[in-house]
Amino acid sequence: MVSIDVPAFYREWATRSGEVINAAAGEGSATLADTRLAYRKFFQDSFPAPDGVTFDAVDADGVAAEWATPADAVTGRHLIYLHGGAYLVGDPQGYRGLVGTIAQRLRARVLVPDYRLAPEAVFPAAVEDAVTAYRWLLAQGARPEHVVVAGDSAGGAMAISALVAARDQGLPLPAASIALSPWANLEHTGATMRTLDGIDPSVNRAGLRRAADLVLGNTPPNSPLASPVFADTRGLPPVLIQIGGHEVMLSDAIRLAAKLAEDAVPVRLDIAPRMGHVWHLLTGHLPAADKAIANAITFAQDHLPAP
């Protein structure tokens, strides 16, 4: 296992993310393609894929995607994982470490859509691709009650918004949803956007606002699919939200949990004291990350049929 200096990781992650935002905005000398490749390599070097999991490319009805399959996968058990990256960066290859770990521990095949990114494809392209991948999975014979949807950051928001869109399109909904450090409000009005700005080790309000401007196109930031804190979430399956106590997104994650509860969606909110954005990536290096992943796996197992 790669040894990770946690504060150094977060500093480097912040730097890499800033380079992507600059390139997406047409600023600086680096190309967007190069900064995305550097971001992927940083994730691959930091979080190598675990042994015992195979990764295979697949076309999910026009959406490029990747299967992660553990050796002892439970037949028919699936998870869709929506990666983070502010809708600007990230891909299945960079997420093989975290996704492979989840696949092994849940004993599930994991489908990771390589959804379209901004600024080439602005909102709601990412949500559309997530729904298309889910519809494709069902068309392959997956039973919705055997499927969990999960994601982190932008993908954590889509773990809610994609299900809202799927519901509105008449698709049967999965067994549960897991939102890790969700970027749930692109208006960035939560109190911790100010009180924890500068404390969150890798994310800040100014960077999020720049990213949102690049991502939204003509979509208003309070659009329900862009910011699920404003969505009608009635009828969604049980949801687990995990958020770090040092995240600028903390207040908006709490608001999302409250909205789900108001809409009679079974919801559980886990707040990890002093943790930064998507600390789950550091499983194997940070006890709080190990605990969060274990809790997420247990939540999924509790809502899936027994093997």
Image (tube, helix red, strand yellow):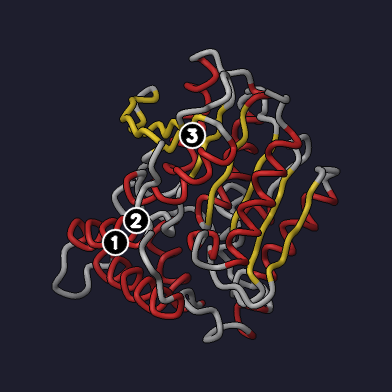
Residue 71 occupies which quadrant of the picture? Answer: top left
Position of residue 281 relative to residue 79, above or below, is below
Q: Is residue 264 left or right of residue 255?
A: right
> Residue at the spot x=35%, y=68% of the render?
17
Please name the amino acid that badge 1 sits on: Tyr
* Disc 3 element: strand
In this view, the mark in front (1 or 3):
3
Q: Pointer 3: what residue?
A: 110
Residues at marks 2 and 3, CA–CA distance in whole angstroms: 20 Å
For marks 1 and 3 on the same chain, the one whose residue lies earlier in the sequence: 1
Crowdedness near tag 2: few (<14), some (14–19) or many (≥20) residues, C-alpha within 10 Å: many
Q: Pointer 2: what residue?
A: 89
Q: Where does residue 183 sit, x and y in percent of width and height?
A: 56, 60
* Disc 2 element: loop
Please name the amino acid that badge 3 sits on: Val
> Residue at the spot x=43%, y=38% of the render?
112
In this view, the mark in front (2 or 1):
1
Instruction: Give the numbered dot on residue 11.
Output: none
Mark 2 and mark 1 in contact? Answer it, CB < 8 Å.
yes
Q: Where does residue 224 sit, x and y in percent of width and height?
A: 62, 49
Q: Pointer 1: what residue?
A: 39
Q: Where does residue 200 sit, x and y in percent of width and height?
A: 54, 79
Crowdedness near tag 1: few (<14), some (14–19) or many (≥20) residues, C-alpha within 10 Å: many
Q: Where does residue 250 sit, x and y in percent of width and height?
A: 66, 70
Q: Is residue 16 left or right of residue 73?
A: left
| Front residue of 107 and 122 | 107
> Residue at the spot x=51%, y=77% of the render?
205
